[in-house]
Amino acid sequence: MAARMTRQRAAVVEALDELADFRSAQQLHETLRARGESVGLATVYRALQALAEASEVDVLRAEDGESLYRRCARREHHHHLVCRHCGRTVEIDGPTVESWASKVAAAQGFDDIEHTIELWGTCADCRASSKG
Amino acid sequence: MAARMTRQRAAVVEALDELADFRSAQQLHETLRARGESVGLATVYRALQALAEASEVDVLRAEDGESLYRRCARREHHHHLVCRHCGRTVEIDGPTVESWASKVAAAQGFDDIEHTIELWGTCADCRASSKG
DNA sequence: CGAAGTCATGAGAACGATTCTCACGCGGCG
DNA sequence: CGCCGCGTGAGAATCGTTCTCATGACTTCG
């Protein structure tokens, strides 16, 4: 049942493992190309989709709507603080937030609650280089 | 400097005022068509863009990436609890969440923090009709 | 080892939302 | 009332993503 492990999928996973930060499918595709690991773009998308379904990677949407992927350290529910310039990512949790979210939603009679909580900012490095 | 008030823009604003919930540009376009208020799709997009810039409407991204627009009661920062089926929306604030977000971000050395906090769920009505 | 079946691949087409182009027309000031 | 410039709209263009379909790579079975 598990997805067949092919050269291409292995390459995608490997690339994700090395890049600690959120990357778009297209960026990953280019990275693989640059490395000589030729993989079709469609395959990259499929691999990412499969990984996302298996909770092997986290997905989030950049402000322009592009999907970004990342191999996270923990598979449990968590959120991210992401640098909007370089993609640098810090995993965070917010137990307070979680309970607040479900409380609020329940109070309004809503069910099947999901929440999107992402923080975007400029990391110290990017701030330094833009001011330098 | 202010945008020129044309029949088309007025129509978009009016439609937003009547529809309390988040709607996509395309839905609004159809609504206007249906009413006989013929407005080009491009114009709807432009109007919404202008309104969003002026903070006259709130924008958020549906799970599939489509942009949804809504005329909110308050112009101050707030969040939303949205029914993913019908778009029904409840405005919420989370003072706790706000401070948590900035604290966490600052602790990591991030600047220019923005946060995305949206709650998605199924409202009571949609739950009833899907179970009926 | 070889055959057959299954699932993966990849190039390009298709898609859907959004933006752009550009000729034309309305809005508002003088 | 007339001019100038922004707004409009139809369709083309863009861009990320998904689909199609012929081909290729494993697996399993003989």
Image (tube, coloured by chain):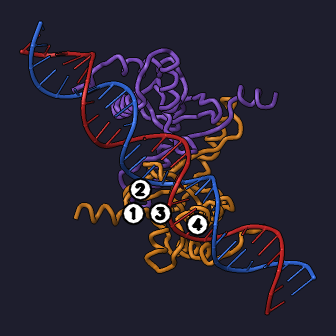
Chain colours: A orange, B purple, C red, D blue
Name the kind of residue labelled 2 in the image.
Ala
Chain of the residue where label 3 is placed in the rendered structure: A
Using the image, name the chain to which the residue with label 1 belongs. Answer: A
* Residue A129 located left or right of residue C1: left
Is residue B94 visible to the viewer in this orientation of the structure? Answer: yes
Mark 3 and mark 1: span between their CA atoms?
15 Å
Label 2: element kind: helix
**Which of disc 3 and disc 4 is earlier in sequence?**
3
* Pair 4/3: label in front: 4
Question: Looking at the image, which is closer to me, A46 or A67?
Answer: A46
Give the quadrant of the C terminus of chain A: bottom left
A112 shown above or below A52:
above
How far is mark 2 from mark 4, CA to CA? Answer: 38 Å
Q: Quadrant of residue A12?
A: bottom right
Q: Which residue is mark 1?
A: A86
Locate residue A101: give its quadrant: top right
Q: Position of residue A125 (x, y in %)?
A: 34, 66
Q: Which element type, helix, strand or loop, lies under badge 4?
A: helix
Mark 3 vs mark 1: in front: 3
Decide which of A98, C30 is in the foreground and name it.
Answer: C30
- Labels 2 and 4 share a subunit: no
